[in-house]
């Protein structure tokens, strides 16, 4: 019985080692893919957050322009990166901090709502977030079927103040989400032909 337990422990430890070695992409790959949501002229000088060999969330590269990028989270089973204006970094960092404390989405929403209202958390007006999803080609490691979604934060805006509907009227139509709250934002999700592939 002890032998079986020992073998099980060894196999479990080996699987964890393999996970940490195989699932955390290289720094170079993270830097190259994290910036895909940006126009090419902004990519080289953007700040990039990503993951070290142990899976810790770290700054992979400091930036000198207006963009901050997030590398793909290796714990997720789909590829997704994001880029946002540097003035949003405090707000985004607060969300990550609260999530690390075990707060759920509603708790994070409510805490940041109160902090923005009390001016203890900075959330600028008219700041943009770009989210890019895609599929990893396992042979080339390139990102195929890239699709982006744009978010423009306009805190406490409503349909009445913007003229935008609170739901998309048709596919790809801009609309306002979370109207009247600190997290009010314009959602723009372009449509893509099913057969389209980009790298």
Image: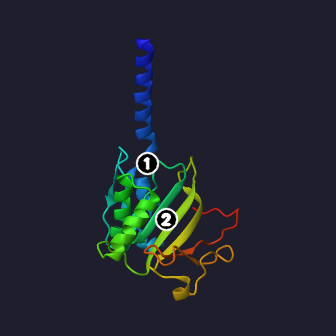
- The image's mark for residue 36 is 2
Q: Position of residue 164 (x, y in %)?
A: 58, 83
Question: Which residue does the image show at 55% across and 50% down from the upper left?
Answer: 140
Q: Position of residue 31 (x, y in %)?
A: 41, 58
Residue designated by label 1 = 25
Question: Which residue does the image show at 52% across and 82% down from the upper left?
Answer: 158
- Which quadrant: the C terminus? bottom right
Callout 2 environment at 10 Å: few (<14), some (14 to 19), or many (20+)?
Answer: many
* Distance (Cα) linking label 1 and label 2: 16 Å
- Tell me if residue 184 comes above or below residue 162 in the rendering: above
Q: Quadrant of residue 127?
A: bottom left
Lateral position of residue 145 relative to residue 64, left or right? right
Q: Position of residue 150 (x, y in %)?
A: 53, 72
Query: Residue at the left extreme?
Result: 120
Tell me, yes or no, if residue 32 can be seen here. yes
Tell me, yes or no, if residue 45 can be seen here. no
């Amino acid at each position: 019985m002890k032998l079986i337990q020992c073998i099980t422990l060894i196999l479990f430890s080996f699987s964890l080692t393999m996970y940490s070695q195989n699932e955390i992409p290289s720094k170079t790959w993270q830097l190259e893919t994290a910036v895909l949501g940006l126009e090419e002229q902004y990519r080289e000088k953007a700040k990039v957050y990503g993951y070290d060999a142990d899976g810790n969330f770290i700054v992979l590269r400091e930036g000198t322009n207006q963009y901050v990028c997030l590398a793909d989270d290796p714990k997720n089973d789909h590829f997704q990166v994001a880029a946002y204006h540097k003035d949003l970094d405090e707000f985004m960092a607060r969300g990550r901090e609260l999530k690390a404390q075990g707060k759920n989405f509603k708790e994070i929403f409510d805490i940041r709502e109160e902090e923005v209202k009390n001016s203890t958390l900075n959330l600028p007006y008219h700041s943009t977030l770009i989210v890019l999803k895609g599929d990893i080609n396992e042979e080339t490691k390139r990102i195929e079927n890239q699709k982006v979604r744009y978010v423009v934060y306009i805190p406490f805006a409503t349909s009445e103040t913007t003229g935008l509907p609170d739901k998309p009227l048709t596919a790809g139509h801009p609309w306002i989400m979370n109207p009247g709250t600190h997290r009010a934002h314009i959602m723009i999700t372009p449509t893509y032909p099913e057969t389209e592939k980009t790298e």
